[in-house]
Image (cartoon, helix red, strand yellow):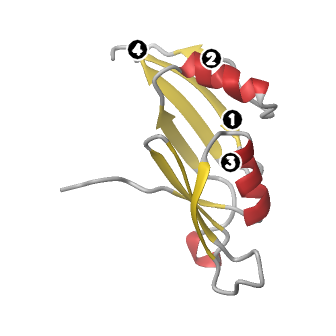
Amino acid sequence: MFKIALPILGISNSASAEKFYCGQLGFRRKYAYRPDPAKLDPCWLGVVRDGAHLVLSSFDGDGPPGGRNLQIYVEDAAAVRREFQEAGVPGVSELFDQTWGNLEFSLVDPDGNRLGFAQDKGS
């Protein structure tokens, strides 16, 4: 039985990624694994917000920073978009009413990973 899919996003700096995801997007740090506690990177940083769980990784083996696309479904896309704008998140797109039944907007994290946020209008 499947339980959860856990996307891994490549990052270049765990401290700046944590500041963005936790400080601006409202996630909280669940864990941080650093093989050398004296160094911030490489790091496997787990962040969570409600039911959305992400891993932010600066380990080379998890792929280079940026270039990944991820979509997170939310209950109220307009409210989440406003929250991000009020938090000063740069590059928040317009809210699009898609022909396939979603309200969607997107943004790009500091490493170039594209995060899409979607609300299924049918539910």
Type of the residue with mark 4: Lys
Type of the residue with mark 3: Cys
- How much space separates mark 3 and mark 4, taking CA atoms? 27 Å
- Mark 1 = which residue? 107
Q: Secondary structure at mark 2?
A: loop
In the displayed structure image, the side of residue 15 where residue 59 appears, left or right: left
Q: Which mark is residue 22?
A: 3
Query: Does residue 97 lie above or below 26 as drawn?
Result: above
In terms of sequence position, does the residue under pointer 2 or pointer 3 come before the other? 3
State the image coordinates of residue 110 (x, y, percent, origin top left).
Answer: 77, 49
Q: Secondary structure at mark 1?
A: strand
Are the residues flagged by discs 3 and 4 in contact, CB closer than 8 Å?
Answer: no
Q: Can I make out residue 111 in this image?
A: no
State the image coordinates of residue 101 (x, y, percent, origin top left).
Answer: 40, 15
Q: Secondary structure at mark 4?
A: loop
In terms of sequence position, does the residue under pointer 3 or pointer 4 come before the other? 3
In terms of sequence position, does the residue under pointer 1 or pointer 2 come before the other? 2
Residue found at x 43% / y 42%: 51
Q: Which mark is residue 121?
A: 4
Type of the residue with mark 2: Leu
Type of the residue with mark 1: Leu
Q: How many marks?
A: 4
In terms of sequence position, does the residue under pointer 4 or pointer 2 come before the other? 2
Quarter where residue 29 is shown: bottom right
Q: For the residue carrying disc 1, how many other residues have a C-alpha within 10 Å: few (<14), some (14-19), or many (20+)?
A: some
Q: Can I make out residue 84 in this image?
A: yes
- Mark 2 = which residue? 95
- How much space separates mark 1 and mark 2, taking CA atoms? 11 Å
Query: Does residue 38 lie above or below 28 as drawn?
Result: below
- How much space separates mark 1 and mark 3, taking CA atoms? 15 Å
- How much space separates mark 2 and mark 3, taking CA atoms? 23 Å
State the image coordinates of residue 70 (x, y, percent, origin top left).
Answer: 53, 44
